[in-house]
Amino acid sequence: MITKEEEAKRVTTTGEIVDTFLDDIKDLPEWVELYKINHHSPSQLNAADDMWSYKYLYLTQEQRRKLPINSKMFCGVCLGDMGILTFGKYLWESKIGKGLCKVEIPPQRKIFDKILEKYNAYEPVDETDKAQHDVGRLGLAKSFQTLKEGLREINLTSPIECERSVALTFDGCILPTIGRIDFEDENNFVEMKTKHRKKNRPRKDGTSNYSLPKLDEGYLGWEEHISQVAFYYFANNEKKKPHLFVMNEEEYRIYSPDNCDDLKPENLKKHLNKLTMVARRRERVMSNHAGKTTWHQDIAPDFNHFFWKGMGEHKDIAMKLWGLE
């Protein structure tokens, strides 16, 4: 499981960057303090409005930290750590009293063993999640090999930096949008996405198996992933070539402007415009309701969306909030 210390480090890192950007805003709106929101992120902007509003306008930061994650998400975190320890030269992290620092990653031994230990420390939220976690463990070694093959093919030039935070304030927005780049060198950056085995429908005898998702263009989540690449591309002032690296346990795909029209600058701009519209709309909602819970009157929920699966009691609370239970 992601420890409280790890989560606190991420929050601290983002907070320091936010403070720097907020210092440049002369008249900070009251709703920033009322809702305790001081930035957007690419992942937040890709979430549905109902899920975003429940998490960020209703729950406190402390409550958000306690929200359950699932084994697929955690497996993706572990694979990202594998990539950092295997290929990274520097890791951007927060140091008390120093802010963000580029820290050299020491030479690593037994990387897989370290990550396997972390993976095994995860606590499944229920029996379904435990079964998924067990399936992920069986494929972790193969995933590590696939990860190494794919990143070697991209062939970033040393020194490779990991998790550098970048910020961009969209046109017409007050708050900055902040994100962290997975891997980058002087002229390129990589956004890494992992896909995991999913449980198929039960057979007639009641048993089930797990299959690997396809990685061809247009897969579930493709639009969201391209929009994240768009954010990092423009946050880097269009100076670095974008790469979307997508992998599952057995194979990978590398998308770039050379083989994918969606990653050409003119199309990345369209995806950035979509993120901009979402950020503007949400700032209007926060401004119009100024700290009150009446914001739900302007947001239509969809509780059948897969985002709400695994939210447990929070789905029930949200449905009551919208008057649907």
Image (cartoon, rainbow, N blue to C red):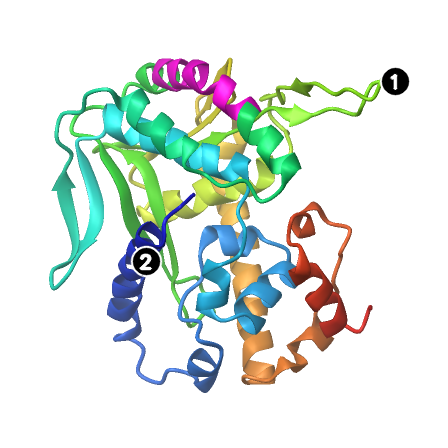
Quadrant for the N terminus in the image: top left
From the viewer's perspective, is residue 41 above or below residue 243?
below
Kind of residue at disc 2: Ala
Residue 219 x, y percent position in the rendering:
63, 29
Residue 122 occupies quadrant? top left
Give the number of marks: 2
The answer to whether any part of residue 30 appears in the image is yes
Residue 63 x, y percent position in the rendering:
50, 66
Residue 190 occupies quadrant? top left
Which residues are drawn in magenta?
A: 135-149
Of residues 276 and 266, the one nearer the viewer is 276
Which of labels 1 and 2 is toward the front? 1
Task: Considering the whole magenta stretch, tell me its main secondary structure.
Answer: helix
The answer to whether any part of residue 242 appears in the image is no
Q: Which mark is residue 224?
A: none
- Among the two numbered marks 1 and 2 on one chain, the one whose residue lies closer to the N terminus: 2
Residue depicted at 11% across the width and 64% down the height: 97
User: On the image, numbered disc 2 is attached to which residue?
Assistant: 8
Residue 17 x, y percent position in the rendering:
27, 62
Kind of residue at disc 1: Lys
Mark 1 secondary-structure assignment: loop
Give the CA distance from mark 1 to mark 2.
46 Å
Mark 2 secondary-structure assignment: helix
Quadrant for the C terminus in the image: bottom right
From the viewer's perspective, is residue 292 above or below residue 94?
below
Residue depicted at 56% across the width and 64% down the height: 55
User: On the image, numbered disc 1 is attached to which residue?
Assistant: 204
